[in-house]
Image (cartoon, rainbow, N blue to C red):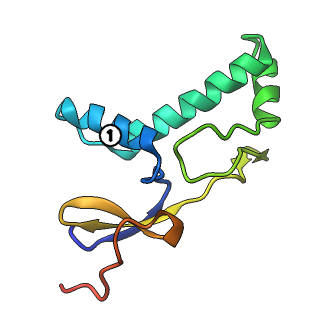
């Protein structure tokens, strides 16, 4: 997969919390995959909504999520803002597989390596 470029949701590689979580996951022999960091980010958002809802009732939680401005995450996002179920504060990143690891290449604010282009096939 070396050289493959993808655009997807990815963690902020400059956030220390993301790097600490990555170390913990890899220390267990696991791959720090999309599912791992997205689950962590989602659970932090849900915990924030539960605290603000002050209830386990579905309607209260949905209302808290709709009014969310959660920003204490390690994703390259601004504060959450749900419109019709979509988080308008989200921002995907472009990544490229470099030396068997996924690295952020765009946008520059999160860049870990220069993009390798054109690919040598």
Residue at image coords 77%, 36%: 68
Q: Of residues 19 and 38, which is closer to you in this image?
A: 19
Find residue 98 and report its horizontal and vertical position in percent: 24, 68
Find residue 11 and report its horizontal and vertical position in percent: 46, 49
Q: Of residues 48 and 65, which is closer to you in this image?
A: 48
| Mark 1 neighbour class, 10 Å CA radius: few under 14, some 14 to 19, many 20 or more | some
Q: Is residue 107 visible?
A: no
Q: Is the residue 73 above or below the residue 99 in the image? A: above
Q: Is residue 20 left or right of residue 73?
A: left
Q: Is residue 116 visible?
A: yes
Q: Quadrant of residue 105?
A: bottom left
Quadrant of image for the C terminus: bottom left
Q: Is the residue 52 above or below the residue 109 in the image? A: above
Q: Is residue 75 left or right of residue 113?
A: right
Reading the image, the residue beneath label 1 is 22
Q: Is the residue 52 above or below the residue 25 in the image? A: above
Q: Quadrant of residue 94?
A: bottom left
Residue at image coords 32%, 40%: 22
Q: Is the residue 68 above or below the residue 56 in the image? A: below
Residue at image coords 33%, 44%: 33
Quadrant of image for the N terminus: bottom left
Find residue 2 and report its horizontal and vertical position in percent: 21, 69
| Numbered disc total | 1
Q: Is residue 42 left or right of residue 96?
A: right
Q: Is residue 111 left or right of residue 81?
A: left
Q: Quadrant of residue 42?
A: top right
Which element carries disc 1, helix, strand or loop? helix
Residue at image coords 37%, 65%: 112
Find residue 30 and report its horizontal and vertical position in percent: 22, 36
């Amino acid at each position: 997969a070396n050289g493959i470029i993808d655009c997807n949701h990815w963690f902020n590689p400059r956030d220390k919390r993301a790097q600490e979580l990555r170390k913990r996951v890899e220390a267990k022999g696991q791959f720090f995959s999309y599912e791992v960091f997205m689950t962590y980010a989602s659970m932090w958002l849900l915990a924030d909504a539960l605290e603000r809802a002050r209830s386990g009732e579905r309607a209260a939680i949905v209302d808290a999520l709709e009014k969310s401005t959660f920003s204490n995450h390690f994703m390259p996002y601004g504060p959450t803002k749900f419109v019709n179920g979509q988080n308008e504060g989200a921002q995907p990143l472009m990544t490229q597989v470099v030396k068997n690891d996924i690295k952020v290449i765009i946008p520059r604010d999160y860049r870990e390596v220069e993009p390798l282009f054109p690919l040598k096939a």
